[in-house]
Amino acid sequence: MTTTSTTKSLHEKAVLVKLIQHNWSGRKVDRVATAKVAKDFEVKSSRVGTYRKSLVPREYLKEETEIRRQAYVYHLTNTLPWMDGGVRMTPVTLLQDYLSAMRKFEDAHRAAAQKIGQNYTQAVKEGMLLQGKLANAADYPSADNITSRFGLDIIVMQLPSTADWRIDVPKQQLAELKAQAEKDQQQLQQDAVKDLYQRLGDAVSHVEDRLSKEENVFHNSLFKNLKEIVGVVGRLNFVGDPKLEAMRKEIEAKLAKQTADVVRADPGLRKKVASDAAAIMKKMQSFMGPAKK
C-alpha cells in the first residue's frame, strides 16, 4: 500500500483531535449489600462479584447518555486512528464540518446536563424509594455540582513536525531521534490509510455475507450504510492513495448504487451483486488481510 504524501505535507493536511467526555454514571457498588450477599451464599472470595445499584431511574440519564454515544460514533467515523490515548486525526479540509457537528453535540449535551440538574432532586427521591433499605443519601453527589459531573469537549492539536526540533542533545542523537520520529509518522499515516481499507472491506464483506445465501435476510440499511461508508472513505482519503480511491469507486459503482428493494425483487441481480462483492473482497486481501466473517 502506498501513499502520496510526505511527512511535511501530512503536517499541513491534517490535524489531531481528541474527544474528552465525562459523566456521572448514577451507579454505585454497595459494600454492605455485597458483604451480605457474600455471607448468605458463603462466597469464598471477594473477586466473585459485587452488588452494584442504580441510584436514580435510568430515564433521567438516558438523553445525556445517548448524546455522548452519538458524538463518539461521529467522532470515530469522521477521523482516522493516530495514537493511543484517544488522539485521532482528521483532514484539514473536513475540520470545519467536524467542529460544527461536534459543537452541536456539545450544545445538546450541555442542555441535557442542565436538565439533569433541574430534575436531580426528584430523581434522587425516586431512586431512594426504589432502593428500599439499600438507599443511602451519602451515595449521592451534591445537587450544587451535579451538572459539573458531565462534560463533552474537543481538543484540536497540530500534528507534530520534526522541521524545527530544538532539543538540547548531541547533534548525532538529535538526527537519530528525528529520523525515528519521521519513520514513526510515516507508519502512522500508513495505518490510517489501512483503516480506510478495513472500513470498506468490512462493509463489502457484510454485503457478500448477506447476499450469498438465499435464506439470508437483509435490511434496507445494508446498502444505505455501505453508501455512507464509501462517502466517508472518499473524504478521509486526504493523502490521495490512488488504489484506495480506485477501490472505493468500484464499490460505489457496483455495490453502493444498489437499493435493497430492487435487489430483493431480482434474484439474478442479487447473485450478481454477491459475486461482485466477492470479487472485490479478493482484490482487497492484499491491503487488509483475510476478510472478517
Image (cartoon, rainbow, N blue to C red):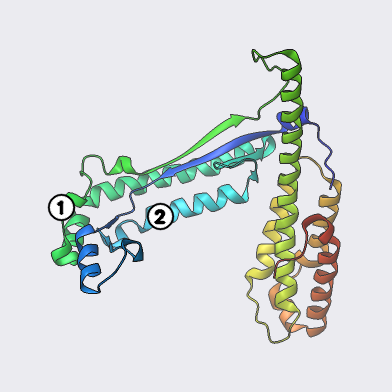
Q: Residue furthest front?
A: 44
Q: Which residue is mark 2?
A: 65
Q: Position of residue 202 (x, y in %)?
A: 70, 63
> Callout 1: helix, strand or loop?
helix
Q: Residue furthest bottom?
A: 215
Amino acid found under the numbered disc labelled 1 = Ala
Front-most of 265 and 171?
Answer: 171
- Asked whether residue 111 is in view, the answer is yes
In space, the residues marked 1 and 2 are separated at their CA atoms by 24 Å
Vertical relation: 124 (above or below) 141: below
Amino acid found under the numbered disc labelled 2 = Thr
Vertical relation: 140 (above or below) 132: above
Front-most of 159 and 151?
Answer: 159
Query: In the image, 100: left or right of 170?
Result: left
Rendered residue at 69%/68% (across/down): 223
Q: Position of residue 206 (x, y in %)?
A: 70, 69
Vertical relation: 166 (above or below) 29: above
User: Quadrant of residue 251 in the image?
Assistant: bottom right
Q: Position of residue 186 (x, y in %)?
A: 76, 36
Query: Residue 137: which disc?
Result: 1
Rendered residue at 45%/51% (across/down): 68
Query: In the image, 8: left or right of 33?
Result: right
Query: In the image, 132: left or right of 115?
Result: left
